Image (cartoon, grey):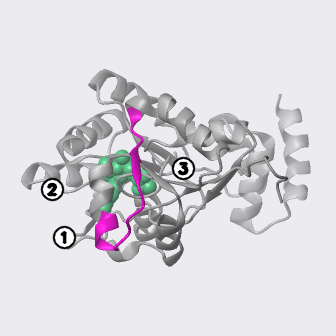
Amino acid sequence: MPSAGQQKSGTLYIVPTPIGNLEDITLRSLRILKEVDLIAAEDTRHTKILLNHFGIHTPLISYYREKEVERSEEILHRLQQGQNIALVSDAGTPCISDPGAIAVKLVHEHGLTVVPLPGASALTTALSASGITATSFLFVGFLPSKKGQRRKLLAALAASEHPIVLYESPHRIESLLSDALETLGERQSFWARELTKTFEDLQHGPLSELLAKSRAGRNRGEFVVIIWPGVQEEVQGQTVEELLLWYRDNSDLSLKDVSRRLAADLGLSRSQIYQQALTLWKEAD
Ligand code: SAM
């Protein structure tokens, strides 16, 4: 317990809100939004609609991108005075391609408590429906709006071995897909549009097919786009020895990564393959 005159600091709660369907808010999120002293919202008008729907009357302050630094200091000050504050964005999880991270960083730096609540996010919702079997992915969020910068970043991502996950708005979906096709070549892709809403739309297909679809229809709603890694050159070789030499001459993978991959593909011991690779790669030098 804080001693008399010493004020206990408040807590900053990070509260996800629905990305469409209002039922997708958790019971805990509703309770925290009710109990805190203040809600810092990306757009107070937007959040008011949500709060009215659930009969919550907590006071609001705005916390938007252009005022992040200023508002973060205000949030810190109020926390230091003992207020509990919930941070929300317009939709989904704050700080994920949304404002919030500057406040969170500042609050951590001052040793105060940050409590994140799990909940809706377009990223995880889309991924769960994509059928991606890879255990890793590369989340990029929004690509730059300028064409040159967008293509440059896409080119830098071309060699990624992980599926690339992107956010896109309806008016830029066509240029995103067209730039992706030109920069990365044909690849398997997926879009999740209007997730959790009435016209939810999940589409798989080569980039050229999704591009044609985006050209044909009215692109209502927001998109999450996933682009599969490029098809790697087919590995040549029958025996472990041949495969090891192929990897040495045709890939940038380290000896350790090659051993790990071959061990998994062939169901053999990794250390055994690693030892064989060490000898072989040395002999072939
Ligand atoms: N922080 C949010 C989250 O956790 O999902 C994302 C905010 S970001 C400003 C908005 C982008 O998220 C949209 O442009 C779109 O790419 C994606 N998004 C949000 N809601 C969506 C929905 N219902 N369906 C598909 N994508 C959505």
Q: Residue at x 79, y 51 (%)?
A: 259
Q: CA distance from mark 2 to mark 3?
A: 28 Å
Label 3 vs 1, first from the N-terminus: 3
Label 1 vs 2, first from the N-terminus: 1
Q: Which residue is mark 1?
A: 199
Q: Residue at x 30, y 59 (%)?
A: 48
Q: CA distance from mark 3 to mark 1?
A: 29 Å
Quadrant containing the C terminus in the rendered view: top right
State the SS at label 2.
loop
Q: Residue at x 31, y 21 (%)?
A: 148
- Span shown in magenta: 50-65
Quarter holding residue 120: bottom left
Q: Which amino acid does the dot numbered 3 rest on?
A: His
Compared to residue 151, the image places residue 176 above or below, namely: below
Res. 220 mark: 2
Q: Residue at x 91, y 42 (%)?
A: 279
Is 58 inside the magenta-drawn segment? yes
41 with respect to 249 (left or right): left
Quarter holding residue 210: bottom left
Q: Residues within 10 Å of mark 1 (few under 14, many from 20)?
A: few
Q: CA distance from mark 1 to mark 2?
A: 9 Å
Residue placed most toward the observer, 129 or 279: 129
State the SS at label 1.
loop
Disc 2: residue Cβ within 8 A of ligand 1's nearest atom:
no
